[in-house]
Image (cartoon, rainbow, N blue to C red):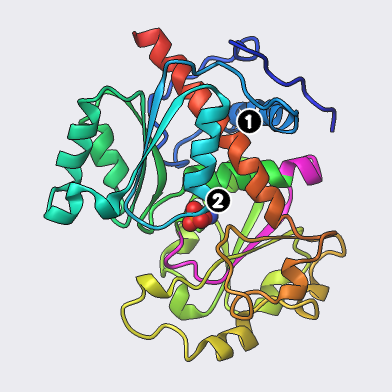
Amino acid sequence: MNAPSAPNDEASLPDGLVWNRRHMLGIEGWSAAEITAVLDLSDRYVEQNRRADKRSTELRGRTIMNLFFEDSTRTRTSFELAGKRLGADVLNMSVGSSSVKKGESLLDTAMTLNAMRPDFLVVRHAQSGAPKLLADKVNCSVLNAGDGTHEHPTQALLDALSIRRRKGRLEGLTVAICGDILHSRVARSNIHLLGTMGAHVRVVGPPTLIPSSIDRMGVEVFTDLDEGLKDADIVMMLRLQSERMNGKFVPSPREYFRFHGLTSERLKVAKPDALIMHPGPMNRGVEIDSEVADDIGRSLILDQVEFGVAVRMACLRLLASTQKQSN
Ligand code: CP
């Protein structure tokens, strides 16, 4: 695809682009035009991030607070980098050494931080709906960095950008989302996004890890990996989220790999140019074999990490444009 021009200091949004959302809580309900707007702007930030001087001043003076109640490597660091590359001040609150440990509630913590007048709160929490709860109370923009099993909107956007940059489109592609669908906020956000953009979405996994009503989201359901992978353009593997499991959902990691792990042998039924994705962190030898994960010709896994920064820059920039209008 043509390389879009990188934004410079105080860059304006592309002509005609008006953004109306104050928060980013989930992809559900977004239009194709909104998704495309984020992806188009992200393409420009990919170019900025590949320059020697990666900084602009578009968010100069703004403050971003990262509030992560669950562990993270990719999402937290990429939001931090995204903010800094746009010239904002970024604060990472360490929940482990905060007054949360003394029993302060989520809402009291958020209201306390809100009183320091941040412009953005980036929230990850084990409880589905936690970012929405905060968004209803605070007067800054809230970005959902993953809430329980509900949504992980910026992950789906960076996944879409990774696919679009390699395949040139989303419409008409067959995407197989495989593994622990039940506990996956990544799966839910991707199902909303890919469906809206005209992709054919399959979910593939053992019956114990597929929600009973998932077909209502417009996806095809497969419990056999070979059937689910047949002629797929994109194979998106998901982590087995043992930390969210109460009880036994799979006999053992070894058995799981045998029937539901992606290997180069299994991949043969997908399209010859099928691409491999994983949101990370990966359990090698559980849901994916290293040979497949590290196949530089077919694996998009490191592209996903790179483009995560650009997507988060685009999200912050778009939300900032609504703050300007209301200030
Ligand atoms: N994909 C993802 O959310 O990774 P982290 O948990 O490392 O942020």
Q: What kind of element bears circle 2? A: helix
Q: Position of residue 287 (x, y in %)?
A: 60, 75
Residue 113 placement: quadrant: top left
Quadrant, the N terminus: top right
Q: Position of residue 109 (x, y in %)?
A: 19, 41
Amino acid at the residue labelled 2: Asn
On screen, residue 26 above or below 49: below
Quadrant, the C terminus: top left
Q: Residues within 10 Å of mark 2 (few under 14, many from 20)?
A: many
Residue at 29% across, 40% down: 132
Residue that badge 1 annotates: 36
In the rendering, which numbered label is found on residue 190? 2
Label 1 near label 2: C-beta < 8 Å? no
- Write down the region rendered in magenta: 164-184
In the rendering, which numbered label is found on residue 124? none
Q: Position of residue 267 (x, y in %)?
A: 78, 73
Task: Reply yes or no: does residue 165 show up in magenta.
Answer: yes
**Mark toward the start of the polypeptide (2 vs 1):** 1
Q: Nearer the viewer, residue 173 or 268?
A: 268
**Residue 185 visible to the viewer:** yes
Q: Nearer the viewer, residue 139 or 64?
A: 64
Q: What kind of element bears circle 1? A: helix
Q: Is the C-beta of the residue carrying label 2 under 8 Å from the nearest atom of ligand 1?
A: no
**Which residue appears farthest toward the left when viewing the image?**
103
